[in-house]
Structures are given as structure tokens and as C-alpha cells.
Image (tube, rainbow, N blue to C red):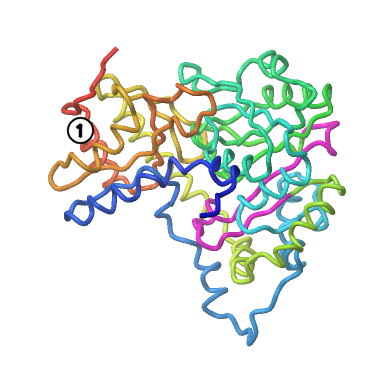
Amino acid sequence: MPKLSDRGKAMPASPIRKLVPYAEEARSKGRKVYHLNIGQPDIKTPDIALNAIRNLDKTVLEYSHSAGYESYRRKLASTYQKIGLGIDYSDIIITTGGSEAILFTLMSCLEPGDEVIIPEPFYANYSGFAVAAGVDIIPVTSRIEDDFALPPIHKFEELISSKTKAIIICNPNNPTGYLYSDEELKQLRNIVKKHDLFLMSDEVYREFCYDGNSHTSVLELEGIDQNTVMFDSVSKRFSACGVRVGAIVTKNKEIISTALKFAQARLSPPGLGQIVGEAALDTPANYFEEVNKEYRERRNYLVDGLNKIEGVFCPKPKGAFYTTVKLPVDDAEKFAQWILTDFEYENQTVMVAPAAGFYATPGLGTNEVRIAYVLKKDDLIKAIDCLERALEVYPGRKLD
């Protein structure tokens, strides 16, 4: 039998999705499963976006330009300009989700064997993109005790070598909900400028900032226009994860022209998704005001409820709709499986994402989980109650 590739063997399983069979088993037993493991919002997709599909009068669903429909890119550029980003439509490539934006950028900017520094914990799929692109992730660890703030900049300096080509951040952060301050971004700008690195920023949650905090894009940082790349997406902003439309945004024309070759090889991004994405740009501001209010209330209830449970520590996120939580357990992955297979309370259980898969350093995150507060408050109340009761009887319960 022919052997599979080493790259295929090295591709990590998703910590977010690999417990799905156990959730399916729980449902087959008639149990209600509260999904806190995945960032699939229950917020309604804007009508203006859905109506673009309902009222579509096309007779042929044709290929678009490999960089995406020009009308969409122009409208997207105009949207960026309204928030202070001096972006032209030619600075944008529309991609199949934010995932393809990251993969194309890594393949365009880094050689196989090059290194990218990423603060951990980080979005788990970055590991898969790195394997596919043949590049190595060098983690710099942020700590739950510091609310997952940017690690001291000297920690980045210590990791830079001749192979280092880029730094990637996610802001606001998935999986922690941390929002980087202007001062932290300036520190990153200085180190990127000093060592002539790329600074790549995943900014798909930028509308979701709380408590008076606001988001600053890496595209706003002075003096590094040619070093910065932003990844964007329709999925979370408009609660339209299934349309699979994202974007590469950069003023570096070499990155654009190189990434376009990868885009040409896959022909075009999703046509229907682009139609939804373009229409969604006309979503009224009050949609985001209502969504932010809803997420803020969910966050407050979740954080307060979790921190009342003995042995649990949950930082208060400043953005996105995730938090990484420390649990009083021996092994979070074992717990996440056990709560699906061996536990139920009033015929209910909970699915969480073990956090070890969001770290690159072995041994970290073993007693942490990522929780997405994407369920309505009534479901969160039941999920937290269920989680508390599960922790009380879990055989591997381990209080400090």
C-alpha cells in the first residue's frame, strides 16, 4: 500500500472539531448538547445579505475575477476608508474564507523552513496552515494570569533568528478574547521595523470590542506599510460562516501580485458568497450595536458564572466572543470527552474545546478550555449549571 505524505501525517486534527463524534453519540442518546466549543454564532445573518440571494436575478453563476468581483473589492475598500484605512480596491484579494487568506499569504511571503512567531494560545488552525505552507511556528507564550496580554517584547527578540520572517497576531484574539492596546501594537511595529519582518494580523473580530475599548488595525501603524498584511472575513462579522468569504488586505503590491497567482490556481472565490458579502456591507450600524450589546451581556453572565465555580478562573475578554478558562481538572481533553460520553444532567451536557490544541508548546493548556459565548443567555445559564455539576463529580477533579 502506498505511503501517505509526511505533511499529511503532520497535519494536526482540529481541537475544536475532533470531539464531534462524542457529541453526536450524546445526541443519539437523546441528550441536549450545548455547543460552547465552536465560534458559530446564533445571531441572525442580516436580512440585507440574505435578500441578495433571495432576489438574485442571475441566469448564470459565472467565475469571478481570481481576486474577487471588482464591485465587491471597490465597496470593501470604501468601507475600510470610512474607518481610516487608506485602502484601494487593488490592495485586496477576496479569498475562500479567512483561512485561504492566511494560507496564501504564508505561501507568498515565507519559504519552506522559515519561521513565524505567534503569541500562544493562538487559533488552532494556524498550525494546519503552517504545515501546509511548510513553515515553522515559534510560539511566544502569553499567560492566563496576565489576561493573555502581549508577552514582553524582549521575549520576541530572544526568538528572532535568521529564519524568522513574520509575526502573526489575532486581534481581538481567538481563543482568548484579548484586545491588543495601541502601546502593544507600537512595540510590535518597532520590532518588525528593526528586523524587517512581516506583521500579519487576523482582524476578523474587529467590530466586537467591549467596555469602551476600540480596535486598531496593523494597517494604521506608521512606517511599516510594506510589512503589514490584514486578514479579514465575512463569517463572524455578519454571522454568515457558511458563505466562506475572506480577504487579504495589504499595500504591499508584491504580496498582492504573488498571492494572486495562488488565487488564479484555484480559479475564483465563491460567487454566491461574494454576493452575500457585498450586500452585507450595507448592513445598518444598529445591527452591530445590538449584536455588541448581546455579546457583552453574554460575556458578563458567562464570566461571572464561571468564576463562581470553585477552582475555575476565567479572565474577562475585551473583544471577540471567546474566553480561555482554567478548570480544576487533571486533563481538559479527558474532561471534554468525559462530559460528552459519561455525564448528563437533566439529559443535558456541554461541549468545550480543549485548549492544549491552541498552544504550540507541549504541556501548556492541559487544564484550560476555550469557550465561545455564542449561545443565547437562557442556553448559557443551563450550560454553566451543567458544567458546574460536571466538575463536582468528574473523577479527575483537581483543586489547587
| Quarter where residue 282 is shown | bottom right
Q: Residue at x 46, y 43 (%)?
A: 14
**Relative to 161, is 118 above or below?**
below
Q: Residue at x 77, y 31 (%)?
A: 165
Judging depth in this view, the residue of 365 and 37 nearest the camera is 365
| Quarter where residue 333 is shown | top left
> Seen in the image, is 61 located left or right of residue 186?
left
Was residue 239 drawn as part of the magenta stretch in this picture? yes
Was residue 178 drawn as part of the magenta stretch in this picture? no
Q: Residue at x 24, y 35 (%)?
A: 387
- Please, which residue is most extreme toward the bottom here? 59
**Relative to 190, is 110 above or below?**
below
The quarter in which the C terminus is drawn is top left
Mark 1, residue position: 390
Q: The residue tagged with tag 1: helix, strand or loop?
A: helix
Q: Residue at x 18, y 26 (%)?
A: 392
> Seen in the image, is 285 located left or right of residue 295?
right
- Please, which residue is most extreme toward the left here? 346
**Relative to 157, is 175 above or below?**
below
Q: Position of residue 268 (x, y in %)?
A: 70, 67
Judging depth in this view, the residue of 153 and 264 nearest the camera is 264
| Quarter where residue 30 is shown | bottom left
Q: Position of residue 325 (x, y in %)?
A: 39, 28
Q: Position of residue 385 (x, y in %)?
A: 21, 36
Q: Which residues are magenta?
A: 221-248
Question: Looking at the picture, which amino acid does disc 1 mark?
Answer: Ala
**Relative to 202, is 67 above or below?**
below
Callout 1 environment at 10 Å: few (<14), some (14 to 19), or many (20+)? Answer: many
Q: Position of residue 96 (x, y in %)?
A: 63, 59
Judging depth in this view, the residue of 309 and 101 nearest the camera is 101
